[in-house]
Structure formats: C-alpha cells, structure tokens
Amino acid sequence: MKEVTVRATYKYGFEWSYLYCLSCMDKGRVWLEFPFDLDASATKALKHGPKGAGTVNVTVRGTFIKCGHCGHQNGYPFKFVATKATEVAVVIRGMKSRDKEQAAEKQWACGGTNPK
C-alpha cells in the first residue's frame, strides 16, 4: 500500500464520516477513518472543525482502500485511513437544511466555485 495526500471535503456527524469532492461524487463516497493514535498536530488541526457535526475542507495523508463494503453499515465502497490531517477550513457548522448545505457545498466544498 502507498500513502497519498489529498485535499477533499470531509462531512461528519453521528453516523457518518466521509470524504468527497463534488466533481467525482458519482464514483462513491469514501469512509474516512482516523486511528486512535493520531499525532498531536493532526488532532490539533481537526479541533478547528465544528463540534459533533459539520463539513470542512481538509488535507489528509493516509492510505486509500477499495473495500467494497466498509464504514457505517457497510455503506461505503472505499475507505481512507488517515495518518495526518492539516489545513482545516470550515464549510458548514453543524447540520443545516439540505438546500443550505447544497448551496454552501456548491460554493466552498472541493469541486465548488470557490473552495476554501
């Protein structure tokens, strides 16, 4: 396996934790997994995101795995196991209506008109 670094949008909440980019959503969402022993600088970077639920753009380093069925309720075709996280930029704090989320994503998420 090879480690890679990507800049993507990370959406998380009670039962979801995934990476995506608007320009490749048709390929499937990627379950994002952080190990318990994530280094201190990555933990500090992630603290810039909203508590509990939100959407952020983030640069992550780790291993991309085609797993078929992984993540919550085996609902994700891919998994990214992160070893590092940096450059967190908030797109959405908490959960909003689907219309508000789509508008914010269209503008600021990865693949949007003006990504953060």
Image: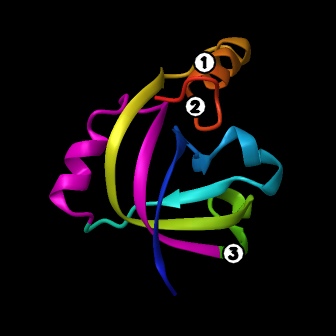
Earlier residue among tags 1 and 3:
3
Q: Judge from the rendering whether residue 43 lies leftward or rightward of residue 13; answer left or right.
A: left
Whole-Å distance between the Cαs marked 3 and 2?
23 Å
Give the quarter of the image for residue 50: top left
Q: Which residue does the image show at 38% across and 31% down from the upper left?
A: 89
Q: Judge from the rendering whether residue 27 lies leftward or rightward of residue 115; answer left or right.
A: right
For the view shown, which residue lies furthest in the bottom direction? 1
Q: Residues within 10 Å of mark 1 (few under 14, many from 20)?
A: some
> Magenta region: which residues?
38-65
> Closest to the observer: 103 or 13?
103
What type is the residue that disc 3 sits on? Lys
What residue would you read off at disc 2?
109
Position above or below: 49 against 104 = below
State yes or no: discs 1 and 3 in contact (Cβ < 8 Å).
Answer: no
State yes or no: discs 2 and 1 in contact (Cβ < 8 Å).
Answer: yes
Disc 2 is placed on an element classified as loop
**Residue 93 makes an appearance in the image:** no
Earlier residue among tags 3 and 2:
3
What residue would you read off at disc 3?
66
Where does residue 61 sit, x and y in percent of width and height? 40, 64
Select label 3 or label 2 by which is in front. 2
Where does residue 2 sit, x and y in percent of width and height? 49, 83
Q: Which residue does the image show at 41% across and 33% down from the upper left?
A: 52
Whole-Å distance between the Cαs marked 1 and 3?
29 Å
Disc 1 is placed on an element classified as helix
Where does residue 7 sit, x and y in percent of width and height? 49, 49
What residue would you read off at disc 1?
104
